Amino acid sequence: MEINDIIRQFNINGKIKSICPLGNGHINDTLLVTTDCEKYTFQRINTDIFRNPDELMENLFAVTEYLKKHFPEDKTINYVQTLDGKRYFRCDRGCYRMSVFIDNVIALDGARNASDFYESAVAFGNFQKKLADFPADTLHETIKDFHNTAWRLENLKKAAAADSIKRLEGVKNEVDFCLSRENKIDTGIKLPLRVTHNDTKLNNVLLDEKTGKGVCVIDLDTIMPGLSINDFGDSIRFGASTAAEDEKDLSKVHFSLELFEAYVRGYFDGVGNALTDDEIRLLPHGAVMMTYECGMRFLTDYLEGDTYFKTSYPEHNLVRTRTQLRLVEEMEQNYNRMLEIVNKYRK
Ligand code: GN1
Ligand code: MG
């Protein structure tokens, strides 16, 4: 089936004028479809990773319908159904979905300044607060053990033991670094089950191109029942770094306490008093764990031959691993400062 024919399966307005690539996600393929009267975000769902698109799309529709109903004045992603009323379209080329493109916004791969990061924090904090009464246990766990850090470590150990494409020799230091943090993984954490986004990168908040204010949280694929500290932590992992996730020059990669503080301030402005004391106390732990975990995931994928994350060159996953581990180290060194900052802004 041709891509235009797939697009026409959806209930879109107008004639298709152009189709071009959009964004730089590591998992799905995203296109911008422009018609003579509207713009749409069109995505091919990576079903190697999201194995149950029915459950995935059920989660997305449930959460966005809830947000639209309870917060009609806020911008929420509007998914477009197929002409026969389905949430996505399946054909021999894969599974596809459509949503209305949100215009006059920017998605940033790095904060231009602390204020960008502050605004993203307000948006994610708000997102958490707005979904506080949504019954988290009704959502499907679309990727099992997604933030099970202990399991991620076990996978790394297996990948290292198998060394299937003979890359272990070059990454012994990185593997040792991960193994040496095993005792930091707290498997006994008991925190409230929340609706979590699980991919709270800066570029998953659209900011108004004029005012810089957060407009809408996007990329809802990994919405699942989970822990607030992981969402907080993943934002810090990605956004409180002075360099890109795949910066090759490690001397440019630092954990920025200034950016961390901007995020914490914005996060509490958004989330208000919706978190428990235990959650608040463990926010810095979430940051360290998400960064450590993501580093292990990149490293595991590198050892397994780059089958999960999209890569642009052979060492890409290793480069990503190294930035993450560098950040872990610096977060560990700054842990007490992080706690102080959290206590300064908590509500
Ligand atoms: C993936 O595709 P993207 O960029 O939204 C990944 C996240 C990682 C992130 C690292 C489903 O997200 O978990 O943190 O890359 N998503 C999935 O940049 O595995
Ligand atoms: Mg994502």
Image (spheres, rainbow, N blue to C red):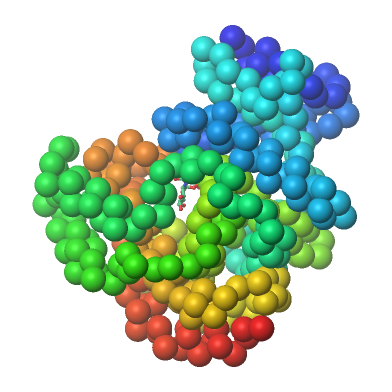
Whether residue 248 sits left or right of residue 83 in the image: it is left
Name which residue lies at 79% across and 22% down: 11
Whether residue 187 sits left or right of residue 39 in the image: it is left
Whether residue 114 sits left or right of residue 234 in the image: it is right
Residue 70 versus residue 101: which sits nearer the camera? 70
On screen, residue 285 above or below 210: below
Name which residue lies at 53% across and 60% down: 193
On screen, residue 315 above or below 58: below
On screen, residue 130 above or below 298: below
On screen, residue 236 above or below 71: below
Q: Position of residue 229 (x, y in %)?
A: 50, 67
Q: How many marks?
A: 0
The quarter of the rendered structure image containing the C terminus is bottom right
Residue 159 versus residue 154: which sits nearer the camera? 154
Whether residue 267 sits left or right of residue 313 in the image: it is right
The quarter of the rendered structure image containing the N terminus is top right
Q: Does the image show residue 24?
A: no
Residue 305 versus residue 54: which sits nearer the camera? 54
Q: Position of residue 272 (x, y in %)?
A: 70, 75
Q: Does the image show residue 247?
A: yes
Name which residue lies at 49% across and 77% down: 278
Q: Position of residue 58 (x, y in %)?
A: 62, 35
Q: Quadrant of residue 205?
A: bottom right
Q: Quadrant of residue 129?
A: bottom right
Name which residue lies at 18% across and 46% down: 158
Q: Quadrant of residue 165?
A: top left
